[in-house]
Amino acid sequence: MKQVEIYTDGACSGNPGAGGWGAVLMYGEHKVEISGFEKSTTNNKMELTAAYEALKRLKEPCKVNLYSDSAYLVNAFLQGWLDKWIKNGWKRNKNEEVKNVELWKELVRLADTHEIKWIKVKGHADNVYNNRCDKLATDEIKKNS
């Protein structure tokens, strides 16, 4: 299996508001940057979208280290939130609907295809790739707003 490093980030101007996402994918000497924009969205949705769009680009099952500054994204996989949500019919503890359900379902499907290690990084710190993803995301907002 190929080993791929993925960094992701999402940003939102207002919450909700205009949003952008960015990702950097690296395999060996190859590096690809992707990004996108949504007119009205939330920060959490952009964080999920960045991971989804990056994983969607992989053409075969891979070993992935996925780095994100989103506790929402990383903890859902590492702390069993997703298992509980699925067991509860995509409802949270308070019997309220899980937000961004369709994105979560796609992320679960993609996570089942790959061997993913979810890694939480500190946002807006000294991680060059996380900072690059943040710039990709915020540039999308500036470019499209």
Image: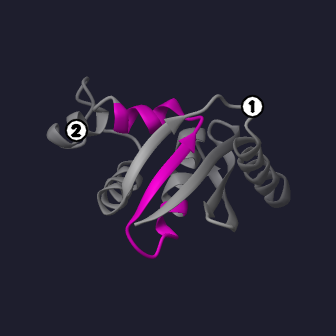
Q: Name the residue rendered at 52%, 70% in the picture.
A: 57
Q: What is the quadrant of residue 15 in the picture?
A: top right
Spatial CA span between label 1 and label 2 = 30 Å
Q: Which labelled disc corresponds to residue 124?
A: 1
Crowd class of label 1 (few under 14; some 14 to 19; many from 20; radius 10 Å): few
- Provide the residue span drawn in magenta: 54-78
Give how far across and how far down residue 16 sits, in percent. Answer: 62, 40
Residue type at the position of mark 1: His
Q: Name the residue rendered at 24%, 37% in the picture.
A: 85
Residue type at the position of mark 2: Asp
Q: What is the quadrant of residue 36 in the picture?
A: bottom right
- 85 left or right, relative to 21: left
Q: Is residue 74 magenta?
A: yes
Give how far across and how far down residue 80 sits, in percent. Answer: 28, 32
* Residue in front for this viewpoint, 113 or 36: 113
Q: Name the residue rendered at 41%, 54% in the picture.
A: 103
* Residue in front for this viewpoint, 76 or 128: 128
Q: Which residue is mark 2?
A: 83
* Residue in front for this viewpoint, 21 or 102: 21
Q: Earlier in the sequence, mark 1 or mark 2?
A: 2
Q: Is residue 139 magenta?
A: no
Give how far across and how far down residue 12 sits, in percent. Answer: 68, 42
Local SS, label 1: loop
Crowd class of label 2 (few under 14; some 14 to 19; many from 20; radius 10 Å): few
Label pair 1/2, CB-CB below 8 angstroms: no
Locate the N terminus and report the quarter of the image it occupies.
Answer: bottom left
Q: What is the quadrant of residue 29 in the picture?
A: bottom right
- 145 left or right, relative to 108: right
Local SS, label 2: helix
Give how far across and how far down residue 111 sits, in percent. Answer: 35, 55
Height in image: 51 above or below 121? below
